[in-house]
Amino acid sequence: MEPTRENSLRTDEVPRSVQFQSFSIKTSLHVWRASSRAESTHQQLSVYLLQSQDINFRMGVTQNNTDMEEGTLEIGMEYRTVSGVAGPLVILEKVKGPKYQEIVNLRLGDGTTRRGQVLEVDGEKAVVQVFEGTSGIDNKYTTVQFTGEVLKTPVSMDMLGRIFNGSGKPIDNGPPILPEVYLDISGSSINPSERTYPEEMIQTGISTIDVMNSIARGQKIPLFSAAGLPHNEIAAQICRQAGLVKRLEKTGNLMEHEEEDNFAIVFAAMGVNMETAQFFKRDFEENGSMERVTLFLNLANDPTIERIITPRIALTTAEYLAYECGKHVLVILTDMSSYADALREVSAAREEVPGRRGYPGYMYTDLATIYERAGRIEGRKGSITQIPILTMPNDDISTNQCPPISLYANYAIGKDVQAMKAVVGEEALSSEDMLYLEFLDKFERKFVSQGAYDTRNIFQSLDLAWTLLRIFPRELLHRIPAKILNEFYNRDTAN
């Protein structure tokens, strides 16, 4: 029966799904009372959410009928027991039953409110990390309220094509997101027994990645960079060009398939300056890739503690798009060095024993909670693929992250011949040495050197690679199986 104006206010007839409302400390309860004048319970919920301008990290609260009728929300006790402030942390005493990762609301003396999360519990003491920073917090006027809820973020298909800050709040002057569900940002790693082996590919349009470091759906593959290198441009190029690989018919023609449009990108930038943030926004909007991208921007002047939750919000959004909406999601995280620096700052504020370079000893465990959320799940159509970008401190690779040189034997021989040529001259080289020099030159000039707007699908990249290999006589390609050589070496595409 369609509810009328008279019965729309009777909470005993409101479904439990509608009673599951979102609560924000920056939204007055008068919003709910104003929205109750709507014509239907569905309109009540819509008006309530649209009038709320801060939808960031609402906590799901199921209210009983008495609370709904009285217009009150009992979410926890308040304390005025702040004993100290250290960096982004607030230390509380005489707290009854604090829980790890519980969300707290802090109200300052000037009436402003901030949000934090319990980081450590020791009896009646609790350490809270404040997302908006601790400036202005004192032990005389600041009150702390424990909510009993964990950190959740609203997710929806409408998040595609939108820009958010590091806390998940829209910053593109668009309307608020009407959430379809609230999810815990911590998520969980995928059960190994439920993982599906990654086989299908995501192409980036960059030959050196697609051919030499192919990315399978559900895989995680890092991109190591250094200060001054164009990793931001590479990340933007991947967003412009990435997509699912079209299947190839036996006739050699490309065949469209139903999954071609089920592709999305979640891009999380951490600790970037304003110039870099504007570059990403402008590039995505001007090149038409924004409609399939959800962009999270944590700026360098944003609270450091926000960087710790930014990748988790991005991955929670990706999990919803992948496992609930059936999309193949590519998650790009840049720069993970900024994330590690945020961990180090929090660890120093907690006066923990530092590890190498001052990073906390649990950093690798913490990073694993992010990277292990990539993969494919048995029975689900979607997948999550990660490309974390890491700027190495002081350009230092203390362990051999690069692939063995034996994978590129002909290129390595070409570099040796090039060095020998500088000593003995070109006249002293054999005809075979000249082949390696020719391969070296064309490999770097045609294959590796690819323009920022030069898109190649995987088939074009493979054809180019075979064109380079045909420089050598067949007997020198002894690392390639004979079956592969018989199929591709003498193709008509040879120059």
Image (cartoon, grey):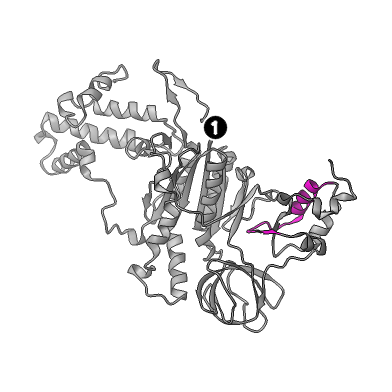
Quadrant showing the N terminus: top right
- At x 54%, y 59%, the residue is 299
Quadrant in which residue 140 is drawn: bottom right
Looking at the rendering, the stretch of residues picked out in magenta corresponds to 40-62
Q: Is any part of residue 326 visible from this angle? A: yes
Q: Is any part of residue 278 visible from this angle? A: no
* Residue hosting label 1: 261
- At x 46%, y 75%, the residue is 350
Q: Nearer the viewer, residue 132 or 220?
A: 220
Residue with the most extreme front position: 12
Q: Is residue 43 magenta?
A: yes
Q: Is residue 348 above or below residue 245?
A: below
x, y (%) of residue 59? 65, 59
- At x 86%, y 47%, the residue is 39
Q: Nearer the viewer, residue 76 or 83?
A: 76
x, y (%) of residue 440? 24, 36
Identify which amino acid the numbered label 1 is placed on: Asp
In this rendering, would 402 be left or right of 48? Answer: left
- At x 18%, y 29%, the residue is 477
Quadrant in which residue 417 is drawn: top left
x, y (%) of residue 152? 59, 57
Quadrant showing the C terminus: top left
Q: Is residue 223 above or below residue 289?
A: below
Q: Is residue 307 magenta?
A: no
x, y (%) of residue 448? 33, 38
Q: Secondary structure at mark 1?
A: loop
Q: Residues within 10 Å of mark 1 (few under 14, many from 20)?
A: few
In this rendering, would 359 be left or right of 290? Answer: left
